[in-house]
């Protein structure tokens, strides 16, 4: 590391900065590289970059540094994609999963399957070389058992993808209800800041307001919607229509009721909207628990909801429990994995699925008495599919597609 003065070609001082030299192959990319740590003023940074461009440098393409690291064998393709996921992570759990993948968790998870496939292929190819020898039925049963074990391992990874996908993509949660039920107050309580306007005037929220929060490890886009009521205000009418559309697009809805008042016709209208959206899980949030309770929720409404939470947005009572219930509603149809490797990438999942399909085809061929050549070909297809995850088998188009999604330079 060297401390020195940076000048442009005309000798004008740019900044006093530290330059770190990383000789290859020990650098991030495996090539000779230098990093300049200057002060963070946009003016200084722009002057420095313009100077470097004049001196013959060029701006990096999206993902170019990580692409070079992959091409020089510094990381496999799944690790390279984990760099992007780590940069984009919005929760501690997202960051943890990305770090584990950056350290090779995906490759380690697939390694036993790959080794088993190679061993089975070798055994079958050896038999092909000695076709005059009879293959014992017991030996074929053993191979079938090994393929069944590989199929089971791959199935475990595929089944865990649902939760892994939630970790990577996050979820959308809409807060809905009639005007003045306390939606915006509850939104602020969940976000933990005064993000939405709160007044006693009905119709204050005229458009959807959203904020991303950490929902017990999931990145959740929380949406405060316009209250549903009869109104002549054209702007508010547009907000209500947007609320109706959002109800069909989110993963979970929090139906806010004012516990200090009776269940009203406008509450029924909101429920009719939510109950008409397929299998949308709805959480009843009975608000204003700090006041005397008068509400009587119709049995058909409460029984159809995923859960009920009693909250007070103004005091924070029950907000933590509501977070937990919302998290449970988001992951209800997925196998939740907190230990072991997670497949979070759609491309990886596609590769593992194709590998499992090829292994199943090999099992069926072996069971049906097909010649070893057909079984081996299916297993080679399975092996190639696994190789695509880490980049052992890949094509240029795939690399271009992956690295184009990176931020500039990284």
Image (cartoon, rainbow, N blue to C red):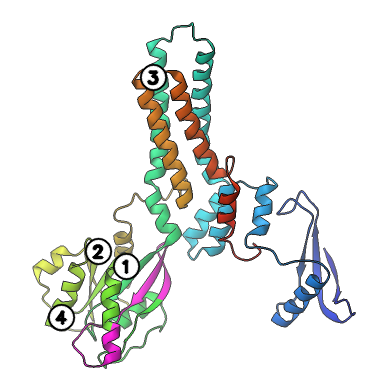
Q: Which residue is mark 3?
A: 370
Q: Do tag 3 and tag 1 residues touch (Cβ < 8 Å)? A: no
x, y percent for residue 175? 29, 75
Q: What is the spatial separation of the Cα atoms under label 2 and label 4, in whole angstroms?
A: 28 Å
- Mark 4 or mark 1: which comes first in sequence? 1
Disc 4 is placed on an element classified as loop
Residue density around tag 1, few if under 14, some if 14–19, many if 20 or more, within 10 Å: some
| Left or right, residue 94 beside residue 191 | right
On the rendered image, what quadrant is the C terminus found in?
Answer: bottom right
Q: Do tag 2 and tag 3 residues touch (Cβ < 8 Å)? A: no
Q: Is 45 in the magenta?
A: no
Judge by depth and name the residue closer to the eye, 182 or 351.
351
Q: Which residue is mark 1?
A: 250
Magenta range is 211-239
Judge by depth and name the residue closer to the eye, 201 or 192.
201
Q: What is the spatial separation of the Cα atoms under label 2 and label 1, in whole angstroms?
A: 8 Å
What is the quadrant of residue 214 in the picture? Answer: bottom left
- Mark 3 or mark 1: which comes first in sequence? 1
Q: Is residue 234 visible?
A: yes
Q: What is the spatial separation of the Cα atoms under label 2 and label 3, in whole angstroms?
A: 47 Å
Q: Residue at x 30, y 69 (%)?
A: 322
Q: Which residue is mark 4?
A: 293
Q: Residue at x 28, y 77 (%)?
A: 243
x, y percent for residue 278? 21, 62
- Mark 2 or mark 1: which comes first in sequence? 1
């Amino acid at each position: 590391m060297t401390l020195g003065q940076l000048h442009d070609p005309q000798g004008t001082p740019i900044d006093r900065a530290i330059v770190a030299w990383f000789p290859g192959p020990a650098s991030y990319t495996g090539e000779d590289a230098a990093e300049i740590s200057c002060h963070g003023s946009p003016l200084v940074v722009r002057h420095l970059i313009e100077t470097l461009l004049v001196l013959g440098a060029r701006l990096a393409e999206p993902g170019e540094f990580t692409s070079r690291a992959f091409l020089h064998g510094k990381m496999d393709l799944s690790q390279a994609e984990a760099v992007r996921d780590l940069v984009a992570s919005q929760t501690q759990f997202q960051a943890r999963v990305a770090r584990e993948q950056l350290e090779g968790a995906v490759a380690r998870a697939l390694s036993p399957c790959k080794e088993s496939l190679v061993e089975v292929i070798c055994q079958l190819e050896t038999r092909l070389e000695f076709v005059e020898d009879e293959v014992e039925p017991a030996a074929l049963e053993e191979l079938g058992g090994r393929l069944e074990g590989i199929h089971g391992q791959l199935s475990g990874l595929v089944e865990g993808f649902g939760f892994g996908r939630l970790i990577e993509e996050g979820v959308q949660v809409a807060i809905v209800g009639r005007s003045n039920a306390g939606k915006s107050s509850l939104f602020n309580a969940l976000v933990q800041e005064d993000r939405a306007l709160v007044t006693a005037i009905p119709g204050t929220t005229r458009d959807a307001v959203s904020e991303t929060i950490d929902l017990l490890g999931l990145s959740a886009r929380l949406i405060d919607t316009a209250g549903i009521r009869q109104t002549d205000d054209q702007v508010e009418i547009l907000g209500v229509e947007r609320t109706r559309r959002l109800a069909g697009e989110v993963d979970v809805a929090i139906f806010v009721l004012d516990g200090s008042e009776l269940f009203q016709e406008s509450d029924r209208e909101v429920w009719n909207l939510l109950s008409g959206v397929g299998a949308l899980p709805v959480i009843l949030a009975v608000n204003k628990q700090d006041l005397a309770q008068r509400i009587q929720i119709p049995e058909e409404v409460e029984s159809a909801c995923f859960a009920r939470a009693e909250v007070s947005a103004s005091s924070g009572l029950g907000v933590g429990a509501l977070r937990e219930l919302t998290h449970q509603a988001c992951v209800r149809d997925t196998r939740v994995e907190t230990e072991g490797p997670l497949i979070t990438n759609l491309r990886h999942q596609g590769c593992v699925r194709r590998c499992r399909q090829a292994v199943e085809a090999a099992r069926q061929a072996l069971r049906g008495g097909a010649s070893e050549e057909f079984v081996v070909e299916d297993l080679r297809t399975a092996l190639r599919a696994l190789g695509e995850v880490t980049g052992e088998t890949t094509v240029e188009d795939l690399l271009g597609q992956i690295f184009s999604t990176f931020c500039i330079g990284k």
